[in-house]
Amino acid sequence: MASPAAAAPLKYVVGIDIAKDTFVACFGRIEASQQLRFGKEATFDNTLAGFTALLAWTGQQRTAAAPLWFVVEATGVYYEELAYFLADNTQALSVLLPNKVKHFAHSTEQKSKTDQLDARLLCRLGLERVLPAWQPPTPALRQLRVLARERQSLTQQAAKLKLQRHAYQHSYRPDARTLARLADHLQLLARQVRAVDQDLKALLETEPDLARRLAHVTSIPGMGLTSAILVVAETNGFALIENERQLASYAGLDVVQHQSGLAARAARISRRGNVRLRTALYLPALSSLRCNPQQKAFYTQLRARQPNGKPGVIAVMRKLLLLCYSLWTNDRPYDPQYRLAPPAEKEVAPATEAVEATQDEPQKVLLQDTQR
């Protein structure tokens, strides 16, 4: 670190690259001259003792009074205990989505990738950018996510087991005892799903605000309560989402193009987002094509330009997700007659047909966008 006689810092930042058992922290500072100073990285255990040691180490690195900010990447669930510990100790913290960190890394000259370099990269990002403060999800949203993921896992297991039982039933001379065990396993999964549903019902009864907002989301034709719970749970109530484009990227529903010279691939969604979120939107999209006249009309327009129906379903999934975000953040129910004034300048859609399927309408006017 720079000597105490150096220029007073404007801000301290601790970048943290976290893994299952350990995490690497890099301490840095930005001075009035806009120079960045980085210290030597340190490794700590991803435990309560390691969190306490991190705060003690950070206090030793500070040489003057200046704001201190921690920057952590949302890596799986391994960051959560540290994030809650820092929040409980009133430390300023930013939890960044992986795609934001990746985009920043592309803007630097860093080519290698190690835990130490990743920690320094997060520290540099915090020094160069103004980042939003992380707000821990409420206990209700945390419990909602646990139950939603448990239910989704149980239903996926049951669907796989049904296929196995069906295949075995039609095999040559199936064993009756094996079929009985498969049937017992299916009954067990069904009981567990019902138990999770009871826990979800009890949670919503004790959280009227959460139940009201979920009712707004389920007012969308085709969106059931189970799907709405998954969407809200996987986004933590859209707490880390800053805008619609970021939400589409987080769900992996953003469109990517590959073109160089005369070679060009068909545009497609990135699929580099939350697969649980995309899975939760698929069946509601199909359902909305049967019971939502606006979505059905939009899909019909897409099919007129694109013979393949898959891009149209993906476009409906994306529209449903953005509509859920709008209704949740504005705390209002779905209104099929609602219209917003047209924007001054319309966003021009790319010419590629697959891109048109998902980015055909202006994104800033969400409710109007979903009514076309």
Image: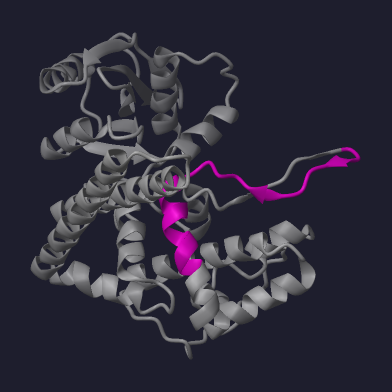
- Count of numbered marks: 0
Residue 320 or residue 161, whichever sits in front: 161
Where is residue 99? Give x, y as percent: 49, 39
- Residue 179 as seen in the image, left or right of residue 261: left
Tell which of 336 and 103 is nearer to you: 336
Please tell me whether residue 287 belongs to the stretch shown in magenta: no
Give x and y (percent) for residue 23. 28, 18
Residue 163: image x %, image y %? Answer: 43, 48
Q: Is residue 276 rendered magenta in the image?
A: yes
In the rendered view, would you say 136 is above or below 238? above
Percent across and percent down for residue 244 are 49, 60
Look at 45% across and 13% down and name the residue there. Answer: 114
The image quadrant of residue 372 is bottom right
Question: What residue span does the magenta drawing correspond to?
Answer: 261-285
What residue occupies the far right of the structure in this picture? Answer: 262
From the viewer's perspective, tell me whether residue 143 is left or right of residue 37.
left
Instruction: Locate the N terminus and report the quarter of the image it occupies.
Output: top left
Which residue does the image show at 48% across and 44% down from the upper left? 273
Name the one closer to the observer, 272 or 24: 272
Q: Is residue 295 left or right of residue 54?
A: right
Specify the color scheme.
one colour
Does any portion of residue 271 appear in the rendered image? yes
Q: In this view, which residue lies farthest toward the front?
A: 173
Query: In the figure, 347 relative to 34: above or below?
Result: below
Which image quarter: residue 89?
top left
Q: Is residue 344 visible?
A: no
Judge whether 323 appears above or below 234 on screen: below
